[in-house]
Amino acid sequence: MKLTVACLAFVAALTISSASAAELEPKLGKKGALLLEEKFDGTELPKNWNRNTGKLTVADGALKASEVAADMHAAAFRRPLPLQDAAILVKFRFAGARMFHLGFDPAPGELKKKGHLFSVIITPANWSITEHNDKSDPKSTNKALARATASFEPGKWYELLLEVKGDDVLAQIGGLEPLRATSKDFHVKKPGLVFRTGGKDADEVHLDEVRVWELK
């Protein structure tokens, strides 16, 4: 039986999609126990997803987050989950938001520094692995340890795989060259996932299919 041009194109698209998905496997280690899986299939914010600032809603099978101008702060929310070496997979898409962060804080007592540890920071035009400043030191500044230009189309879903093992961090997004960074403090225990997004009140980022594994 002959395949039509449309069928061949469909098969090719499936092959490319499968290849892209297959690329998002850990490179710093192997997956261990599954620590978290959240698909946002309901209509309520799942248990233990904690809003600090901004607006969070669950609809259409996704978590929708946006900044609230009155907060005078980017939208910030957390999912407590004690971990150290881990791989985090999350689907995201921009729906007007100007940036999206996924990162960590150090667990209490792990470091003398005050503030966040590091984040993958994604905008519609670039992405980076950024080590955050020590808020107790006025001279400390954020440091982009790895950065690349990229185009993230509004309304299109992307998959991000973030790995941390010891002091090494690797971030992958299908179709892009991975970003890798190292810092002496990255190995510390972490109390959970930290998310941030920003833009005008109606500008959102959408998240889906968040999975976290131990990394061995």
Image: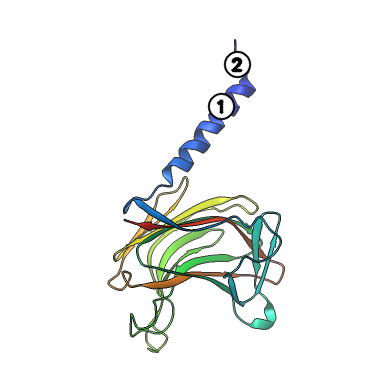
User: Who is closer to the viewer here, 113 or 78?
Assistant: 78
Find residue 127 and report its horizontal and vertical position in percent: 47, 60
Against 177, residue 207 (above or below) is below
**In the rendered image, which quarter is residue 74 located in?**
bottom right
**In the rendered image, which quarter is residue 134 located in?**
bottom left
Q: Which mark is residue 11?
A: 1
Q: Amino acid at mark 2?
A: Leu
Q: Quadrant of the N terminus?
A: top right
Find residue 212 and report its horizontal and vertical position in percent: 46, 58
Q: Which mark is residue 46?
A: none
Q: Amino acid at mark 1?
A: Val
At label 1, counting other C-alpha atoms closer than 10 Å, the crowd grade (few under 14, some 14-19, many 20 or more) is few
* Residue at the top extreme, as displayed: 1
Proximity of marks 1 and 2: CB atoms separated by less than 8 Å: yes
User: Who is closer to the viewer here, 119 or 40?
Assistant: 40
Against 35, residue 4 (above or below) is above
Find residue 168 and report its horizontal and vertical position in percent: 31, 62
Q: Earlier in the sequence, mark 1 or mark 2?
A: 2
Against 196, residue 177 (above or below) is above
Find residue 50 and report its horizontal and vertical position in percent: 58, 74
Q: CA distance from mark 1 to mark 2?
A: 10 Å
Residue at label 2? 3
Against 109, residue 152 (above or below) is above
